[in-house]
Amino acid sequence: MNGRAPPRKGKSLQLHLEVHWRENFELRAELNSEYRDRRADAIKRVIANMTVGKDVSGLFPDVLKNMLVYLYLMNYAKTQPELVILAVNTFVKDTADQNPLIRALAIRTMSTLRAEKILSYLGDPLSRCLRDENPYVRKTAALCVAKVYELKPELCVDYGFVDVLRDLVGDGNPMVVANAVTALSDIHEASIMAAQSAAQNSISPRDPEEEEVSFPIIPAQKFVIDSATLSKLLLALNECSEWGRIAILNALAKYQATGVEESEQICERVMPQFQHSNGAVVLGAVKVIMVHMRNVEKQELVTQMIRKMAPPLVTLISSPPEIQWVALRNINLLLQKRPDILANEMRVFFCKYNDPPYVKVEKLDVMVRLASERNVDTLLGELKEYASEVDVDFVRKAVKAIGQTAIKIESAAPKCVQVLLDLIQTRVSYVVQEGVVVIKDIFRKYPHSYEAVIPTLCANLDELDEPEAKASLIWIIGEYAEKIENADELLGIFLDTFKEESYAVQLQTVTAIVKLFLKKPDHAQAIVQRVLQTATKDSDNPDVRDKAYVYWRLLSTDPAAAKAVVLSVRPPISLPNTTVAPAVLDELLSEISSLASVYHKPAATFIGKGRYGVDEMSKRRADFDGADTSTRKALETVVAGQKSENLLDFDTDEPSIADTSIATNTVPAGYAPSSAAVASVAAAKNPLDELMDLFSNSNLQAPTSAPTLSVTSPNQASVAAAAAASSLLDFDGFGGLGTSSASQPTSKPPTSQKPSEDLLGLF
Amino acid sequence: MISAFFIFNQKGEVLISRLFRSDLKRTISDVFRIQVIANPDVRSPIITLGSTSFFHVRVSNVYVLAVTKCNANAALIFEFLYRFVSISRSYFSKLDEEAVKNNFVLIYELLDEILDFGYPQNSEIDALKMYITTESIKSELAVREDSAKITIQATGATSWRRADVKYRKNEAFVDVIETVNLLMSKEGSVLRADVDGQIMMRAYLSGTPECKFGLNDKLVLEKRSDRAKADNAVELDDCQFHQCVRLGKFDSDRSISFIPPDGEFELMKYRSTTNINLPFKLQTHVVEPTKSRVEYAIHLKANFDPKLNANDVVLRIPTPLNTTSVNCKVQVGKAKYVPAENVIIWKIPRIQGAQETTLTAEAELASTTHRQAWSRPPIEVDFSVVMFTASGLLVRFLKVFEKSNYQSVKWVRYMTKSKGTYQIRF
């Protein structure tokens, strides 16, 4: 390839054009040469120029005479439609050639030309090729139908191509069957998309005039498998190529079984595919099994399937890293549905030193999911090892994983804490910071259990410079203020720099000092005055100010109520078994190995029209017949989370989109690098809004006219409400409970009504 | 499915560009160049920008990229990309910038055949080689005769085999290649030891031979209540087969039967985790007596039959980042410090079974203000041992049945190797 420099400006552009023209001229001469090899050589150069983006369309008539010709044509047919017509005759002639390869090539090329004028000539040759005696031609023609449908659906209807495709599903040749299934699925999706855009009257990707004529009259071309087709597909499954198998497995996953027996039959026939060497076939088979297993009643069959599923999944972990990663993301999903699948296989997920970072992070996640009392010692040893590696991101995740293990397995918690302390003593800044955050979580799970570690934490105060770590330490100091002698001094340090701290730290400082005051009223009078004054006067964040005002009024009017609110006992946290709502999980499991399952997000959130509306979700809800109220609420939470996110942002960030920290899944990952941090910010910010809503329900104007906030609500119910709110007022690192739905910063009254009701219900 | 396929060089120049669907423009390649090639922070193999997803694989000095706009099958796309890489390697022995530039016409032809409208079609190397060739075009008549056969094969139930193969001498070679994955802790306990096995076959057999293949698979031998043999049998955790193997039959009675492709192919892959024979034992004694010195004593023992040999044994022993010089002494082979990689490389061309040898080394360190302790990455051992299987797997038989009932000769070779997967912490 000739790598000539791109044109710059003025003179050089002129020069470039001249060179370009001369080059084309030479090419033309060679294309018309009488020697065959020279002609072939010239064609190659034309294609080379085309690849690097040079315009060689001027050579159209010359190229036409010469098999690479097709490639050239495909490239320029769109821009030079009138010239393409010159080629049509040759093509139509070629589709009747004696050589099946030529027939297939001609029909394939014609259908890829994407020129309106060609299409009108395509009908007859295509219907001939669809019935060709040679399977190679038939399988090529089958896909052509999908191509034509994309360009001009009415042509397919006129010639009845879609019906011919349906007949081809019963073809004797497995490749033809597979391609017919592929084409039908493609058309199915395209027609649904078209129907949607027609319904919405929005601009479709095609020409506007064409759209108006075509859409209303095209009936949706749905591809629904019936029982008769099913048996044909199951038969073809064992005979066709790996890619064909994937297409058929996809179709099987979408099939609605008519009864238990049919589901069982599908499962039994698909199971052998676990032994295929192509990872995509294995995942395809897993998908079909997960879908149809829901209907299987025979318990022993289910156990057998689960048992047979594990080894191939493990084998995928020794494939190339990209496939490994896709497999790991899917295994993560599978474990959420069936935690028992890989119970004895933790060792294969141990990270190799030279694994790419995205694989390591996923393995870590799977390891924590597989942690149990039996293997926790080995796991901790590994995690400690990882925490001394060099990759900062991975080390942090490893430290976090230690905390998750402690929360998951109570008996292992003391060991986890010991490991964390060892790590904190290395005094590596990011390890210490992450360690503090994690220990805070452990305190939330096991209150008053590991107080002995507090002095070590406080000794590392100077190491902390990240808001989340600072906020965590402040929370710990506030929570255990009565046991820390110099708590006021420590908190004083943060108060001195109050204005420079981030809001999360400010909020924590306010709460912690109030706690300190309630626990040790004699010592902390001065400091509480100071913090409330600073927060109300100097903070430029309304949440911080409001929080300080609320505390202030509480303290000045009814210290006992303040105690009940601020020092109330919080429910211990737990590690959620799932990172996605159950209904979404089921949907994702029926799309295993697709992008959606890799991202752990329904497809509509990242393709199509971008936003994932509530309408869409409620439509979906109707599909899940078994969806009870809790799933509905969960779905709403998902919607709320999803709305505020921007995929463009987070994709460039990190591979792990649904960052499965202990925080709830619905935290918009696009907010900040670490979703746990987001959780703390969001949760710390929003509860106040929530609180205001709560009280405005009882006809109280909260910020200004509420000097007697809890006094005017004498009944016990409001105390309960206050207690509920207190857990929110308090630092809540795990936006647990209903707060996740509050991750929308601007919650308007009608939407925020529900979360606050949920909260009340919970207590 | 796949809307576009690109190959880029390291600078981000487009070497190959092929659009398969109309939902993308050629300029999408610029987005990838800017967002991925020019951005060193990208860590994920899939990037989704807006509704467009980019799947890429790096092979030597090129990026192979597939772009899609739908909720595509991610596993399929990566499998396809790797298949493309292996097809390219088999056509022009390697895949790098130079090879792509020299063979771009061939690559376009291949792409057209293996992808249609973004759906992978026929990717069997043997079948492809029949009609996509580097040679000049044959005479019209010959082509016509052949192509009928080709098309039947490319779509047939045995797309991997021609019907009219003929050999004067019928032979089949079986290579059992095992890769050992080992992770050993500082304390010397085995954290993970398993074997990824691969059975490669080269079949030079006439006609349409029906093959049956038998291993010392514990499940099979136990079923036949062959107690004596079952004791030496190997437990396979998982097997995966070439598409020629009848999976249904394996699923029902664990027998491996197939009609092989002509020439070389990977018959099966397997995984075993029980009773792994580790071919090398390592004893490490590494101390840091002062802040400026590390002392190594690495004792290597070949833990297999004295009649066998291991070849190309390479130990990579990590040193701290601030190492200035290393003084090493070995009894066998050669050892030297490679500053660029921060490792001592100890190469032993050949070592006999049961042999033992030691490396002693002293690394001098530059003084540093860096506070973090040295993280001590694991020592890696690479090797290959011929006629040895770490899992204990043996080929019991390979039977060939053909209509003409010819005699065939079969050869079996075993090899156990490791390439960066045998890791020992110290």
Image (tube, helix red, strand yellow):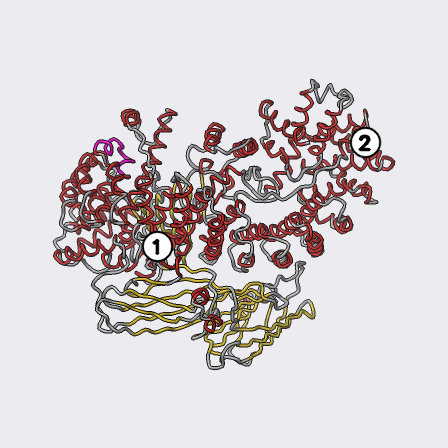
Q: Badge 1: how crowded within 10 Å, few (<14), some, or many (20+)? A: many
Q: Taking B371 as reference, is B313 left or right?
A: left
The C terminus of chain B - image quarter:
bottom right
Q: Nearer the viewer, residue A34 or B164?
A: B164
Residue B250 position (above or below residue A598): below
Res A150 quadrant in image:
top left
Q: Amino acid at mark 1?
A: Phe
Residue A552 is one of the magenta-drawn residues: no
Image position, residue A305 (x, y; %): 46, 51
In the rendered image, which quarter is residue A390 located in? bottom right
Magenta region: which residues?
A147-158
> Are the residues flagged by discs 1 and 2 from a single subunit?
no
Q: Is residue B288 left or right of residue A162?
A: right
Establish if B145 lies above or below A670.
below
Majority secondary structure of the magenta segment? helix
Secondary structure of the residue carrying numbered label 1: helix
Residue tagged 2: A529
Q: Nearer the viewer, residue B160 or B285?
A: B160
Type of residue at label 2?
A: Gln
Please state which of the two labelled residues, at mark 1 or mark 2, is closer to the viewer: 1
Task: Give how far across and how far down residue A283 sits, in percent.
Answer: 43, 50
Residue at the spot of label 1: B84
Q: Residue B293: horizontal and vertical position, in percent?
A: 66, 70
How many residues crowd mark 2 within 10 Å: few (<14), some (14–19), many (20+)? some
Q: Which residue lies at the image location 48% right of the left edge and 32% below the top edge? A: A625
